Image (cartoon, grey):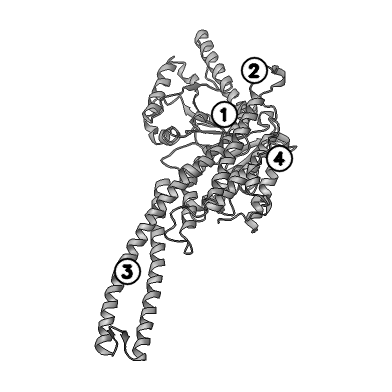
Amino acid sequence: MSSAGKTIKLRLKSLEQHLRKENPVLVAAVESYRHLDRVGYSLGLLNEEQSFATQISWWPMISVLGTFSAGKSTFINHYLGQKLQSTGNQAVDDKFTVICLGGEHGSQALPGTALDADPRFPFYQISNELEKVAQGEGRRVDTYLQLKTSPSEKLRGRILIDSPGFDADSQRNATLRLTDHIIDLSDLVLVFFDARHPEPGAMRDTLKHLVGDTIHRADATKFVFILNQMDTTARDDNPEEVVGAWQRAIAQEGLTTGRFYCIYNPDAAVGIEDDATRKRYESKRDHDLEEIHQRIQRVGVDRAYRITGTLEKIAHRIEEKYVPQLIEYKRQWRKIVLWGDALVAAAFLGLAAVAATLLGHFGDFKWERSGWEGSTVTLVLALALLSVVIGLFAYLHFRMRRFATGRVLSRIIKHYSAGIEGERLSQAFVHNTRPWHSLFRKSPVGWNNRCHKRLQQVIAEANQYVQTLNDTFTDPSGDLSPETMPPTAPVAVVEPVSSTAETDKGENPDEVKQQPG
């Protein structure tokens, strides 16, 4: 096993040790992710440095996104009960800030390398992703990320991420990539807008990225849209008009469901002189804040269902999307190669005809009914020429394979941009087009009945985990008392069922070589 494979193995073991204390059902899920990884390595969807388990967050995560001066940091400070983040009407922080519970040292700020080098955090080795955006950006991780700790007990068991103000016109590709990375990993995404700017038309690009790109996601329900600083509308007493303007703007991006939470920070609110208006605003604010805080409190439960649900989603995606797409990409690749080979063969046949004519004209090499006739020198010359032609054809054939691989890869990258889907399919496609793999093999390399059975087993295990979570957090029969059903209670251990082990009888999971093929 290479050093990269050993690193992945150690990370998963470390993860299991942490989960044994917090949520035992997820310990069993780690083993199911190992089964899923073996299929990924076989198909080339993963390289030896990767694991499906490390491409998700195992800790409850809440991300706070939004426009400049929308009050994101003020909201975080109020929620934590301390002035941790800088606030202001202008952009006061241009970094993504990961906030977690601090130890005995209380509150402190640490550089981005603290996140990049620690596998316990969601930005582990994020410098590699930044390097893909632009050469040298990976070494500047401290300019994009920072880690802050807080003594607030509200952070126990969860991670909070504060983003810099979002301005899609001026953001660099690296920042957009980090934003997408955060959204993918989060269990709850709080999207803040500024009620002081009731006309959102000028923020069309921002809305497109924060709203338009989310409506087709399977996890769109984790997005919460918050209209902050609503106290500024009290003077005109027109909150309905402000909310309506933002709702129309979001509807133009395709999102027609859901609602805004309307809040403001009571510690920084403008004075509302009319008692009736103030009470109405305070009542609405307190009601919406309570709902938002409850969503934050539930992320631990959401996280457990997300991780087990992701198991099933990845297994289905491999069989129903990745495999068929690889078959189609291989078909396109094979078509390009065969057309190239046909053109080369036609050219060589023409050259062969010319060569035969020349040999017959200048030498004593000719065809009789009894076979080829001619001197030994001429025969050796013909065989040498034939060897050169065959060698040249083989060289051009493999060059054509490389050309076709590049053509299809460009289509994959164009279709999937820079997302994880495109990365997985690109890796798998290159794995399938290596020189020693047959041009005429239609099914993806590594795809067989064993892989199919493993995927079916992972799906069965994921369903078992969900049932165990349901038994912990729900009580349809009414047999359990409320005291025995705390919303964040640890769940019982569920061992993966044994049919995968029976299918792979004699195989030691720790000795499986974690690399493609």
Asked if the residue under mark 1 is in contact with the one under mark 2, i.e. CB atoms within 8 Å, the reply is: no
Q: On residue 344, which mark appears?
A: 3
Badge 3 or badge 4: first in the primary sequence: 4
Badge 4 or badge 2: first in the primary sequence: 4
Q: Can residue 137 be seen? A: no
Q: What residue type is labelled 4?
A: His
Q: Can residue 81 be seen? A: yes
Query: Is residue 352 toward the left or the right of residue 258 in the image?
Result: left
Q: Which quarter of the figure has residue 23?
A: top right
Query: How far apart are labels 3 and 4 at the CA level?
Result: 60 Å
Give residue 263's position: percent from left, percent from top.
52, 21
Image depth: mark 4 or mark 2 in front: 2
The residue pinned by badge 1 equals 74
Image depth: mark 1 or mark 3 in front: 3
The quadrant in which the N terminus is found is bottom right
Query: How far apart are labels 4 and 2 at the CA level?
Result: 33 Å
Nearer to me, 358 or 502: 502
Badge 2 or badge 1: first in the primary sequence: 1
Query: Is residue 507 toward the left or the right of residue 210 in the image?
Result: right
Which residue of the protein is positioned furthest toward the top in this rendering?
A: 276
Asked if the residue under mark 3 is in contact with the one under mark 1, i.e. CB atoms within 8 Å, the reply is: no
Badge 1 or badge 3: first in the primary sequence: 1
The residue pinned by badge 2 equals 477
Q: Which quarter of the figure has residue 100?
A: top right
Nearer to me, 308 or 123: 308
Query: How far apart are labels 1 and 3 at the CA level?
Result: 68 Å
Q: Is mark 2 on a helix, strand or loop?
A: loop
